[in-house]
Every structure is written in C-alpha cells, then in structure tokens.
Image: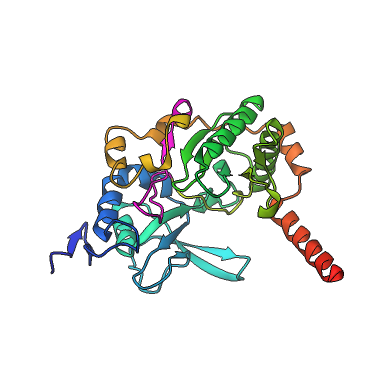
C-alpha cells in the first residue's frame, strides 16, 4: 500500500494525494478527511433517504449519480425507486453509516443530495424547501434579502424555518412539516409561500421559472418538492476551495458569506454541536388556507414548459 492509500473502517481509500478536480485547491484526502470528521453531523441528514451524489472522476466532467454502479459493495444499503422520466427502476444508495460515507468519498463523491422524503414514505416529504437563487455575480446578499422575505411569509402563515447557505451563491430555507401531509399538499404550500414572498417585494424576488423573465431578481424556487433532492447540510460543493452548505442563525445571516464555510473551517464549527439540529424548529402542521392557495398556482416547471412551447410557436410564426 502506497503512502497515498490507507484503510478506514474496512474501506480501502486510494490515491488520496490526487487533486480532487481542476481548480479545487484540495486533494481527495481533504474530501475524505472532511467527511470523516463531520460524519456525525452529515449522516443524520442522509440516513434512510435515497441519495444522489455528484462525482468528480479524473479526466471526466463531473456528473450526478443516482443509480448505484454494479461494482458497489454488497454492504451498501440500497432502495429501488421507479423513475417516471426514464421509465426504469433506479437503485439508490442509503448512506446510513460511516463505512458507506467513506466508500462514497473514495468514489470521489463530492456533493450529497438526499431526497426530502425517507425511503419508507417517499410520498411524505419531511420538509418543504424554498431555494433562493440569485442572479449571476456577487449576489449572495440579494439571496439573503430574499430569504428574509421567505421568513416573513412563513411568520405570516404561523410557520418557522431554518436557513443554510447552499454552498454556492444561494440560500435554502427548510421548514419541517408534521406527519400527515402528502407530497401534493407540501408542494402546494411551497408554491403559496414563494408567491407570498414575491408579493412582499416584487422588485427583489420573483417566482418566474424562465430565466429570461427574472429581470435580475432572486428566483424563489418552489420546485424542490415531491421526489426532489436538495444538497444536504454539511455537504461540500464542487467548487474551488470546497465550500460547504452550512446552517446559519437567522440573526447572523446578513453577516456571513458562502466562503466562510469550507471543508477546512467547518469541522471546527461542528465539533461540539450540530447547528442544523439546534436551529431546526419542531415539525409544524400546514395551514389549510396556505395549501388551498397553492393549489390554485400552476406548477412552475409545467407552466414554463407550456410557455416555452408557446414562445417557440410565436417565433416560428414571426419568422
């Protein structure tokens, strides 16, 4: 075994001194050491949830892996899920323990995207999520301002959420929901909250799914619903210096930047506590009026698809 190889928890770790990806300023060892250091924080976010990962293999463009490869060890837990889009059964991993996490790290899995529902109740997401996606450029402060609109919309509805950096340029607001609500009700409530946030400051926030319609505003994305995945708290992101999606107290949100949280800084920040656990409210029931309001709002992705087709027809006719 070379100096760049070692074994942890029965998992062979190889080529640890290789660069993780071009521009990463981090090695594969940095990724493995980070995930191992925060395993007691990130594994609770992944446990029992079908997992997609973004891998960075040498000489290849990064890609999202949902279906487990044939060479996956037998001891990696998995769950079959029917994929409507591809009309096939997908074998998703369940990353429930250190050994599985280390195996993924050795596979150069940089990002960890679990479903919002657990494997035994895929029709019952545990959280609704609003993803605040700012325009290009140094726009994190705009995402923060939009997240505060979402917080106000939640408060007006009698709800509370927790917030984290996305690890990129955006912000995620998670709202834990009490048992008894299905994916359709959760999606409707998410659409209603996005619309309410937009109404609070339409010059800052928009629910326009089509990018060219956003006009430099922050997109309040209500489509992270149903079987959607969202990058987990404490997951690294595939960007230079390996930033991490990190929980932030609402009171501190205007004082942080995404670059504050990286694979090098986060282990020390979570050694004594789990901020995501500490900041997350108790699960809450969804107000009936919120769900009904959302049911009257078209699903953004479907509406955008129809609008795209309409615009294409109009261009053809004009040409």
Q: Is residue 136 above or below residue 277?
A: below
Task: Report whether residue 174 is seen.
Answer: no
Near-viewer residue (192 or 310): 310
Q: Is residue 64 above or below residue 251?
A: below
The residue positioned 55% from the left and 50% from the top of the image is: 136
The residue positioned 83% from the left and 71% from the top of the image is: 319
In the image, taking residue 30 as reference, residue 155 lies left or right, namely right
Q: Is residue 247 above or below residue 319?
A: above
Q: The N terminus appears in which quarter of the rendering?
A: bottom left
* Residue 72 pos. (x, y %): 36, 69
In the image, taking residue 243 as reference, residue 67 lies left or right, namely right
* Residue 54 pos. (x, y %): 43, 61
Question: Which contiguous range is marked in magenta?
Answer: 233-252
In the image, taking residue 118 as reference, residue 36 lies left or right, namely left
The residue positioned 46% from the left and 48% from the top of the image is: 168
- Image quadrant assignment for residue 18: bottom left
Q: Is residue 317 above or below residue 291?
A: below
């Amino acid at each position: 075994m070379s100096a760049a190889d070692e074994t942890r928890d029965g998992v062979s770790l190889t080529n640890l001194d290789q660069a993780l990806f071009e521009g990463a300023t981090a090695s594969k060892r940095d990724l493995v050491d980070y995930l191992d250091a925060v395993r007691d924080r990130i594994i609770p976010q992944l446990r029992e949830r079908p997992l997609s990962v973004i891998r960075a293999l040498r000489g290849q463009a990064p890609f999202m892996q949902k279906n487990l490869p044939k060479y996956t060890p037998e001891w990696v837990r998995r769950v079959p899920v029917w994929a409507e889009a591809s009309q096939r059964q997908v074998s998703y991993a369940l990353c429930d323990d250190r050994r599985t996490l280390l195996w993924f790290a050795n596979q150069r899995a940089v990002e960890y995207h679990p479903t919002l529902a657990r494997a035994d109740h895929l029709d019952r997401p545990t959280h609704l999520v609003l993803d605040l996606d700012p325009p290009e450029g140094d726009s994190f402060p705009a995402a923060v301002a939009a997240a505060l609109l979402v917080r106000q919309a939640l408060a007006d509805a009698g709800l509370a959420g927790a917030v984290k950096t996305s690890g990129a340029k955006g912000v995620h607001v998670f709202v834990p929901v009490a048992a008894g609500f299905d994916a359709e009700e959760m999606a409707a409530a998410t659409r209603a909250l996005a619309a309410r946030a937009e109404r609070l400051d339409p010059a800052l926030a928009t629910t326009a799914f089509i990018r060219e319609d956003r006009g430099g505003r922050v997109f309040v994305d209500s489509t992270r619903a149903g079987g959607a995945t969202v990058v987990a708290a404490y997951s690294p992101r595939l960007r230079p210096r390996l930033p991490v999606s990190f929980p932030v107290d609402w009171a501190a949100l205007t004082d942080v930047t995404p670059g504050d949280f990286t694979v090098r800084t986060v282990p020390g920040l979570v050694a004594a506590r789990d901020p995501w656990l500490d900041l997350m409210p108790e699960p809450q029931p969804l107000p009936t009026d919120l769900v009904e309001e959302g049911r009257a709002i078209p699903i953004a992705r479907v509406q955008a698809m129809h609008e795209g087709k309409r615009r294409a027809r109009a261009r053809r006719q004009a040409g």
